[in-house]
Image: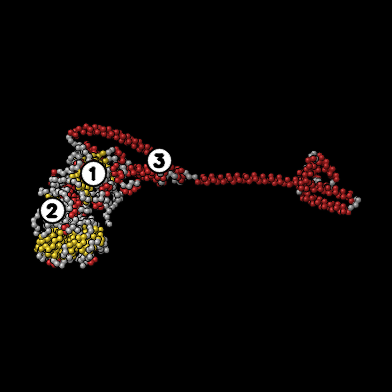
Amino acid sequence: MSSESSKKRKPKVIRSDGAPAEGKRNRSDTEQKCLSPLAMILRPPQLCGTEGKYYSEEAEVDLRDPGRDYELYKYTCQELQRLMAEIQDLKSRGGKDVAIEIEERRIQSCVHFMTLKKLNRLAHIRLKKGRDQTHEAKQKVDAYHLQLQNLLYEVMHLQKEITKCLEFKSKHEEIDLVSLEEFYKEAPPDISKAEVTMGDPHQQTLARLDWELEQRKRLAEKYRECLSNKEKILKEIEVKKEYLSSLQPRLNSIMQASLPVQEYLFMPFDQAHKQYETARHLPPPLYVLFVQATAYGQACDKTLSVAIEGSVDEAKALFKPPEDSQDDESDSDAEEEQTTKRRRPTLGVQLDDKRKEMLKRHPLSVMLDLKCKDDSVLHLTFYYLMNLNIMTVKAKVTTAMELITPISAGDLLSPDSVLSCLYPGDHGKKTPNPANQYQFDKVGILTLSDYVLELGHPYLWVQKLGGLHFPKEQPQQTVIADHSLSASHMETTMKLLKTRVQSRLALHKQFASLEHGIVPVTSDCQYLFPAKVVSRLVKWVTVAHEDYMELHFTKDIVDAGLAGDTNLYYMALIERGTAKLQAAVVLNPGYSSIPPVFQLCLNWKGEKTNSNDDNIRAMEGEVNVCYKELCGPWPSHQLLTNQLQRLCVLLDVYLETESHDDSVEGPKEFPQEKMCLRLFRGPSRMKPFKYNHPQGFFSHR
Amino acid sequence: MERAVPLAVPLGQTEVFQALQRLHMTIFSQSVSPCGKFLAAGNNYGQIAIFSLSSALSSEAKEEILHFSLAHDGPVYSMVSTDRHLLSAGDGEVKAWLWAEMLKKGCKELWRRQPPYRTSLEVPEINALLLVPKENSLILAGGDCQLHTMDLETGTFTRVLRGHTDYIHCLALRERSPEVLSGGEDGAVRLWDLRTAKEVQTIEVYKHEECSRPHNGRWIGCLATDSDWMVCGGGPALTLWHLRSSTPTTIFPIRAPQKHVTFYQDLILSAGQGRCVNQWQLSGELKAQVPGSSPGLLSLSLNQQPAAPECKVLTAAGNSCRVDVFTNLGYRAFSLSF
């Protein structure tokens, strides 16, 4: 290869060196002289003849036949081989004339080499030419190919356009046209043009569309007419409304003007009317209460007055959008979920708000004022808790005269306890609606009793007055305000309320003197006691429920379930000489229908209680069980004081009849002053505790 | 033992009254029916309740009280049972009831008798009844300081035994000879011969220094006898006496006045102030003290009817509405309640 390339370069150098074509020709001329006949074949005759001026191998190539060149090449190679072999032969023979012959042969082989070179160049040129031709042909083919592609694309595009056109949908197809028969029947002939359109569906469709347009235009016209009509009517209504509203103030002024006349004629027509107007906004239970209480007041009890308090506007506002409130509820539920997720620290505040919402009162409340004989008034305010569906009451007692409040009477008239246990067991600290417990669980209220001071007490009788009846067994039953229930309880409850207030007021007065050590005995109860009573009440104080429970001599009462926390507890101390009688008193809120219960402890010659002295037990029995004879005239407000006075008498009897101890010198501490038939009786050696009135002696029961 | 849980519910008027009545109830007397299956108990309100011992003692322990009725105006201080009748007494009258009818509701008394009292401002009570089976008679004693004998056949009062200076608390019959012992508020135990209707012996207990307790008084509250022996208690100490020699042999060391005493086999059972039933040896040793449910006991009853061996129990009642039942002498099994 390297030899080939060096061979190739050499002619080029020569060519570039001998750039002038003349030199070349010259050389070839000189060469021609020394060319062998064979070498002459190489030179094409035409070249020399036609282009005499310069020699171009490129042109020569076209003229020469490659086949012949190939023959030439073969022949030259053979000649070279022969010459080489002869030279080698001559050299190996060696001789004097050999050198000349070798020289000759070397010249011949040089010629052949030249021929080979020439042939090589020609071959190169041919190759180049062939390449150029091939390239040219390829470019042509490429251009054709591109053209073909363009054409194909154009064809495809056109096909697409065609399909698009084929698929086009006209808008009129969506329009719901009247049916064909209807069209021909109704459309005027100038539109339908039956003769043209019958055969041509295109024309037919156009005609139908025309008809449609025509019809729509007509309807639009009609619509506009209706609108203007409506406008006119609205205006008329407006005018009439204005007229009506201008009527209202005029009527009002007439009403105002008539007021003095009403007053003059003692017809509180307007006032009552107003109240009824307000009453319409009361929630059902309060409305029932209002109606029944008013009715009862008018029919049976003139001392009962009924009024409605609170803001009517708020109540109205409550009732206007009932749907909205429901939405609010569901919203707030969703909100609650979100907030619990998002804001944990404010959970407490949220719960607080929910609690407040749950315990919300209706803005209106009903006031009942119950006047007692001595001009003291019981004010009852009834509220309705909307979300709990229960009613509560707040009570207040006002008296005609200013009362000096004894210390021990603190709880007697307090709003918290004055109405406690009006009916047995009705302490008003638990909600009467069983469904409420579930609601409380949601917002974390343990019992209603924590809120009772603020909300009022939900006594059972209050629910009944409001016509609310809560069955014990079915917490889900719907609760409907019922007039008959309210009516059936109105009278008894009102009477109970009056009795309660009177007995509390009576107690209030009695306590004042009890605290000063005086047991007030009214003249109509005087016959129950002997004229001379030596034992004296020295102390009368309240005690706490817990303290009462802890006293050692009250266990029996506690065990018997008579010491509930709704009761009031007192301690009395009765003295005579060295003997001190402690009496622990349970005052049931239902006083005076339920008697106070006494437990005694005597400190005299040792401590004596019902467990170690039968007579102390008997004394307790005398005041607790035989209380009915101590009640005095109805309504037995004197019971407590009579019981205390009776205790003083019993203590006298106990002390005076105590058997004298023979072994002890000196006079008895308590000489017997009472007249007794016998000192002891029966197996348990009872003392004569029974007082016989006109005769004034004591006997056994 | 069975402390009732205080009721949380405040009570109404009638409930409060009933609770108070029960609280201040005293059961004075008990008597077992001749069949041994029923127990009658009388209280200070004049009510008599009939309890079924057999059903209370059965395995189901069902309904104990059969029914109770208002029998007397005053307290029922004493009751005894004959083979057909229940005799009850209290406010000066003795009433007879048929046991067979007592178990039904609305039972009426069979008869009622009042001993001939010397007129007085108040009717004296009858504190003790005693049956004398041999002559089929009943001895009544109480507020008028006399013993009245009544013939149960005819219902007439045959004898009056006078001698006590204060009212009589208790009676006891000496089974061999027709003699009756009586103890009273005057502090004397008197022995009466029924044939001659005369007082044969008087023991003034309070005069014996060993047993006298002047701060408690003289009264003899309980009495029991067994052949030549007699035990009595009350204001003076509980003492065992030998009757023939009229000497106190054993003084039982108990401070509280005793209200009921009885011989049981070789033991003496006594009860009084205090919760316990005391069991004494004759020598004076305290064998046992069995606590009951009442703060003070007034009567003991031993059901020894041969007809109902399964109901052989000791019952004790006193200052409460409960009758304690002791199935053996060792402990209180349960209480029957009014």
Q: Which residue is mark 2?
A: A678
Question: Mark 1 to mark 3: distance in Å?
Answer: 99 Å
- Same subunit under labels 1 and 3? yes
Between circles 1 and 3, the one closer to the viewer is 1
Chain of the residue under label 2: A
Please give the residue where the numbered disc 3 appears in the rendered image.
A216
Q: Pick whichever of labels 1 and 3 is earlier in the sequence.
A: 3
Front in this rendered view, residue A166 or A198: A166
Residue A53, position as x, y percentages in the image: 80, 40
- Per the image, label 1 sits on a secondary structure element best described as strand
Q: Amino acid at mark 1?
A: Val
Q: Is residue B208 left or right of residue A9?
A: left
The amino acid beneath tag 2 is Arg
As shown in the figure, which amino acid type bears the numbered disc 3?
Arg
Task: Report helix, strand or loop for mark 3.
Answer: helix
Query: Would you name the residue on which mark 1 appears?
Result: A541
Q: Is the same chain shared between marks 2 and 1?
A: yes
How many residues crowd mark 1 within 10 Å: few (<14), some (14–19), many (20+)?
some
**Among numbered discs 2 and 3, the one appearing first in the sequence:** 3
Of the two numbered discs 2 and 3 in the rendering, the one whose residue sits closer to the viewer: 2
Residue A375, horizontal then vertical, whole percent: 18, 39
